[in-house]
Image (tube, rainbow, N blue to C red):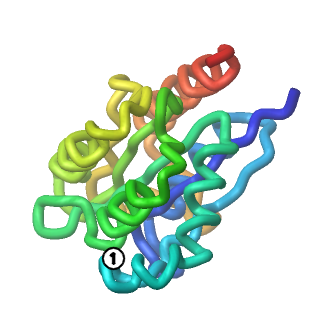
Amino acid sequence: MTLKLLGISGALRAQSTNTKLMHEAVRLFGPCDFTRANLRLPLYDADLEAEGMPPEVTTLAEQIRDANAVVIATPEYNKMIPGLLKNALDWISRTGVKPWEHKPVAIMSAAAGRAGGERSQYSLRWAMTPFNAHILQAPEVLVADSSNAFDDQGRLINERTIAGLEKLMTALREAASKPV
């Protein structure tokens, strides 16, 4: 069986180091049917919701539900997760699909600072508490000074970071392979 892996980058910028990190995670996860989530969603608004669930929100909730596992790479904006990632979580919570329930999820971060997005990971774990996802706790993958952490092909260059990400992706593959 080919595992379905959904990748979520908490940054929209074309050359985002979190998008690069997400792609490295997918590479180390191994053979899979990979889909990258689209977080270009409208801002959550109960009036908009009353008009009907936006189709891109429904698509995202279904992608999460149908995936065997999810990888989330988040930057750190002002010591928290970016608003677009929180917005996506808020929208998904309104769909009634409950796609995160027991879903294996690997969290990682790349940031300019020396902590590598540690606070954003903490805030993401907290923001996902109501969803009852199976968030892998270790190893923590924190890419500091992220603008210098990748080569010209978008590959990580630090062997220790690569080893940690490989261990995390092995654990995610194992969790995704188990029946729910």
* Camera-nearest residue between 122 and 51: 51
Q: Where does residue 60 sit, x and y in percent of width and height?
A: 58, 62
Q: Is residue 171 left or right of residue 81?
A: right
Q: Where does residue 10 sit, x and y in percent of width and height?
A: 40, 64
Q: Where does residue 144 sit, x and y in percent of width and height?
A: 27, 52
> Residue drawn at (70%, 57%), measured in percent from left and top?
35
Image quarter of residue 158: top left
Q: Which amino acid does label 1 sit on?
A: Tyr
* Camera-nearest residue between 38 and 18: 38
Q: In which quarter of the image is the C terminus?
A: top right
Q: Can residue 147 be seen in this view?
A: no
> Residue drawn at (54%, 78%), measured in percent from left and top?
54
- Give the structural element (helix, strand or loop) at label 1: loop
Q: In this view, does 78 lie to the left or right of 173?
A: left
> Residue drawn at (84%, 33%), measured in percent from left and top?
2
Q: Where does residue 70 sit, x and y in percent of width and height?
A: 55, 42
> Residue drawn at (48%, 44%), measured in percent from left and top?
98
In the figure, 155 relative to 140: above or below? below
Q: Is residue 138 left or right of residue 119?
A: right
Q: Can residue 120 be seen in this view?
A: yes
Image quarter of residue 139: top left
Q: Mark 1 points at which residue?
A: 44
In the figure, 68 relative to 57: above or below? above
* Camera-nearest residue between 27 and 152: 27
Image quarter of residue 136: top left
Q: Is residue 79 left or right of residue 51?
A: left
Of all residues, the one furthest to the right in this rendering is 1
In the figure, 131 relative to 170: above or below? below
